[in-house]
Each structure stands twice: as structure tokens, then as C-alpha cells.
Image: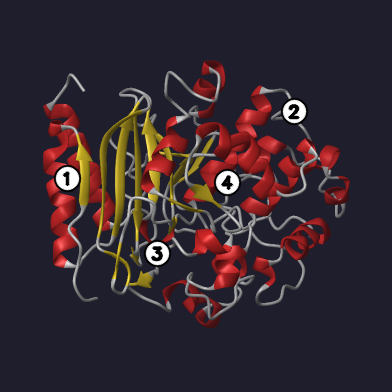
Amino acid sequence: MGQKSVPSLIYSPKFVPLAEHFASTIASGEERGALCVMRHGEVLLDVWGGEKRPGQAWQSDTLACCFSVSKGVLSLLAHIMVSRSEIRLDTPIADVWPEFAAEDKGAITLIDVLTHRAGLPAVSGPVAEGDLYDWDIMVGSLERSAVVFRPRAMPIYHNMTYGHLLGETLRRAAGAGSLRELLQDRVIDPLGVDFCIGLTDSEIARTAQLTQADPDGLFTALDEAPESLFARSMAFFDRAEDFNSAKWRRAVIGSGSGHATARAVATLYGQYIWNESILPTDRQRAIGVQQAQTPKDPILGIPIRLGQGVELSAPPHLNFGPNPGAIGHWGAGGAQAFADPNLGISFGYLTGHMSNQIGCSARANRLVQLLYDCLYDNCDV
């Protein structure tokens, strides 16, 4: 992609091996992106490099799509509202969103959504290509849908429905005009983080152009196995989507269209475990308790372990380090963020070159390995 910029670095000397490895992947052209490690609010490592677009260097404020890492940000909003008694985990969704009760869905609760056990990884009715980008269309589809699987049975990853299910529930509970406004008010402004959803023109100007190892990979199933659950979960997309389109960036898709810096997602996920946090300690502890697991998720095809609105570490596919109590979220293409409560460490990684792996990419796994090598070689961190 032409001349590659040298990464800018801010790091503790303890993390030199991790910083040098990241720099080497930038220099080789394997990587374009950003990586941040924090501990209880202190920045230990903040690196970025490569080109955000041809001829333009990645900057400290470059925004990259973080895909399903966005789900954990919505979950953070939910827990903030739970901690303020604006909604309860056992609140039926229909209590705040009456239209959702149609087709015998009245008993589905907030905790069912947070643990991917609402039974709606897809919808029962017909959908049109491109529905995903219109909030009202997606909300209407979920209202009219019957459950696809029995609620509260095994978890099934709510790939593209999670953001609208949870987002509309929280928006209704708060009486907010939009999910973007609600996130801004309750999460983004209080923390001062560079996370955006439903991007404005000025925010789009800061975005990284994404490339893909396999540009057709995510949508292949729509042709090869259109009745598969994965294909049904993806049927809302525009088939030509490359994740650089204005409609993708402008849409409020809580399951995946969030854009951020690596420091922003490290800060956001740090709230789940840091001493000084937007969440109270008792809520932090509850979030990381395992709620459900499956050896092979029907959507992703990999093992998953779930807390309350977050994934739990399950290497190598969901690799948030060796501590099984570490919480985080993987995003398509390899983006990920997590937090380790044993060490007070949070991690944010965003890439401009998407892997075709489901779950943590080889690049992300190597970063996590080096992170813990640095941590365990420097036990006073």
C-alpha cells in the first residue's frame, strides 16, 4: 500500500517486546492499526501505525470499525442503567417495549438478551437486503418475529440482532431519542472516549479504510447455504458491503458499526474491572460470572463462554489471556477488547486489515501471548 509510517509509541519499558513486535508487523505490511494496554486507567502501551488510507498515515485519533466489540459497549450501557435502577436484569423487554410482546415474546427479559438466550439470532419473517442499516425496519422485524429458538435454552450468538434488541430496549427504558444520544450521554461523554456509532461527516473523515484477507468470505454462506443459521443472521446486509460504505458508517448498528480508537475500547472495557470505574464494584463482579456456555456455537462454530453481556476468555478462539475470568469481546476481522480483573489490565486492538478467521485472529493471539509474557516477566506491573 505504498510507504508505511513508523508506529507512534507511548509505552512502559516493560512492554518493549510487545511494542517492537507490533512495529515489526507494521513495517512488514502485515498490519495497519492500533493497540493499547491500560491498567486501572493508566496507559501502559499505546501504539499505532501503517496507513489508514492510501497515502495517509494512521494517527492517534484514527477511528477503526470495531465490529462486535461494539456489543460490549452496549452491554456497558445496560449495566450502567441497571446500576442506576433504570431497568432490572429480570425486566421483561415488553415492559418497556410493548410491541415486542407480539408472537408470544412477552416473557423474554433483559438478561436473556445479554446472555444471547432470547431466541432471536435471526427473525422468523422475510427480510430484505439492506434492512440492517435502517433502525426502524430492524426494530419492526424483531417486533413481528416469533422466536427462532426456545428462549433460555443454550446460548446462540445473536450476531446482528443483539444491537437492535438491546439498543431499543435501553432507548425505551431511558426515554432517549436514539441509541447514539443515549450512549453519548451515559457512556462516551462521562468517560471522554473516542467511540462513535452512527458517524457524522467529521467522524467519517477520521476513519480507516478497511481491507479484507477474503473480501467475499463473510457473505459466501448466503449463496452456498442460504438456509443456514449463519446466513439468516447475515441476510439483513447489503451484499456489496465492504465496511467502508457511508451507509455502514452512518448506521446505528449496535452489533457492529461502532468505530473507535484502541485507547477508547481499552478504556471502555476497563470499566468492567478497574478500581475507578463508571460501574459499582458489585455490578463488576456479577458481570464476569459465567452465565452460559456451549462447545460449538451454531452461528460462530466455535466454543463460547458468556457472562452478562460479555464473552469470557476461551483460548484460542476467544483469547483474552490465561485467566478464565477475563472478560471481553471479539469483533469480525480480528478486532478485540478485554479486561483481566486479576491484573487490572485492559486491552484494545483494532486493525485496518481484516482477518478471515472466526474468533481471535493469529495476529491478535500473538499480541495476547506477548502481553502476558511481558506481564509475567514483570510481576510488579
* Image coords of residue 310 (percent x, y): 50, 39
Compare marks 1 and 2 and give the one earlier in the sequence: 1
Q: Is residue 34 left or right of residue 98?
A: left
- The CA distance from mark 3 to mark 1 is 21 Å
**Amino acid type for the residue under numbered disc 1:** Ala
Q: Which residue is mark 3?
A: 208
**Amino acid type for the residue under numbered disc 4:** Pro
At label 3, counting other C-alpha atoms closer than 10 Å, the crowd grade (few under 14, some 14-19, many 20 or more) is many
Compare marks 4 and 1 and give the one earlier in the sequence: 1
Compare marks 4 and 2 and give the one earlier in the sequence: 2
Q: Which mark is residue 86?
A: 2
Compare marks 3 and 4 and give the one earlier in the sequence: 4
At label 4, counting other C-alpha atoms closer than 10 Å, the crowd grade (few under 14, some 14-19, many 20 or more) is many
Q: Which residue is mark 4?
A: 155
Q: Which residue is mark 1?
A: 19
- The CA distance from mark 4 to mark 2 is 26 Å
State the quadrant of the N terminus. Answer: bottom left
> Could you tell me which secondary element the residue under label 3 belongs to?
loop
Mark nearest the camera among 4 and 1 is 1
**Amino acid type for the residue under numbered disc 2:** Glu
Compare marks 3 and 1 and give the one earlier in the sequence: 1
Vertical arrangement, residue 23 with respect to residue 18, above or below: below
